[in-house]
Amino acid sequence: MGPRGEWAARCPKGEGCVTILLEDPKRIACLLLTTNQENEVSEEDKSNLSKMSKIIEVSPDLLYNIRAPFPVFKIFDFGSQSTLCRLSDGNYILADTVIYQPDVKARIDEITENGTKLFAIINLHPFHTKAIPDVKQMYPNAKLYGVERHVTLYPNLQWEKERVESTEFRELPWVKQDFELSVPRGLYLEVPGSTTVHASSVLMFHKPSRTLLVDDTFGYLSQVPWLAKLFGYRNDHFYIHPTVTQALLPSATSGAEFMAWAEQIANEWPIENVCAAHNGVLLKNQNQGKPSVHDRIIDRVNAWKPNLEAHDRKYAVTRG
């Protein structure tokens, strides 16, 4: 049992794939971006994309979220992100990479003193990859971290030995001081044989600004595209990635493990701001009088509970 009513269409020039899925929970319609964000980008496209990026000061002097377009069919912008976070020692890291507008690049350089205070570039999602070489070239002295798939895709780049999904990375002193990281339990980080199931990623919580950085596992739509509204989406929509059941491990406990993990994130991380790749930023000062991030996560877990439990029952019977 899984999401119903799937419709998919391949985008031109390898730009990716848009899938509309009708979720079983409450029959809420989902507009899902399932694209690798790693296809080669022409110089013309780089120029066009950079002109549309912008920077948002999420927490003064602590965290800046860079919004970049991710056009599909040259009509819909599903967005992507990169985030500049300040460390306790006064240096900075970039979490995720996008194609930067010149004004945005200039602002990053101003904050980081022409990159001299940019300590590291950290890549969190296995399939958000296409800007990695360009950003590393912009800031050659910054340490470069990624998940195993990033290293496989770009073996000629100078990667640090600790993989972002590993315990070794989380135990680095500068990481422990300012961040919490977590990989969803019960899910493949990269589903074998698939490049379109993107439900899993490495989630990063910046403790000084109380901001969650998330690519795909959770999403937030502040303003939804008109097509999504036809399928039931409304503005201010927090969601779990609609391919979550396709990313579950083949076991009778993976659905329960994912739910327990999401609830643990909601309960243990005091999240006030959310920077989501698709497709926006949920700020504390704009969320007054609305459900908290904690409540939004729990609500979505409850909505998906029947599907996740059905998965576990299926494998309990199969393996019983």
Image (cartoon, rainbow, N blue to C red):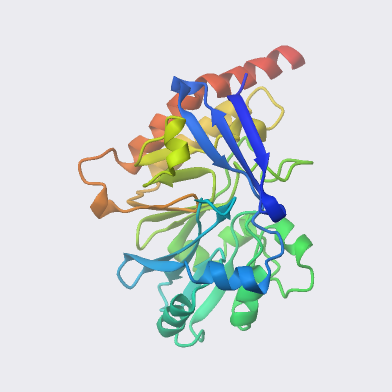
Left/right of residue 42 with respect to residue 180 in the rendered view: right
Q: Could you tell me if residue 139 is visible in this image? A: no
- Snapshot quadrant of residue 21: top right
Q: Residue at horizontal 61%, vertical 83%?
A: 141
Most foreground residue, 174 or 118: 118
Q: How many marks?
A: 0
Q: Residue at horizontal 35%, vertical 56%?
A: 210
Q: Residue at horizontal 74%, vertical 63%?
A: 151
Q: Quadrant of the N terminus?
A: top right
Left/right of residue 211 with respect to residue 133 in the rendered view: left
Q: Quadrant of the C terminus?
A: top right
Most foreground residue, 18 or 111: 18
Most foreground residue, 234 or 252: 234
Q: Is residue 306 above or below residue 292?
A: above
Please state the horizontal and vertical placement of residue 110, each as a whole percent of the image. Answer: 41, 84
Looking at this view, name the residue that lies furthest to the left. Answer: 289
Q: Is residue 303 above or below residue 170?
A: above
Q: Could you tell me if residue 217 is visible in this image? A: yes
Please state the horizontal and vertical placement of residue 16, each as a whole percent of the image. Answer: 66, 49
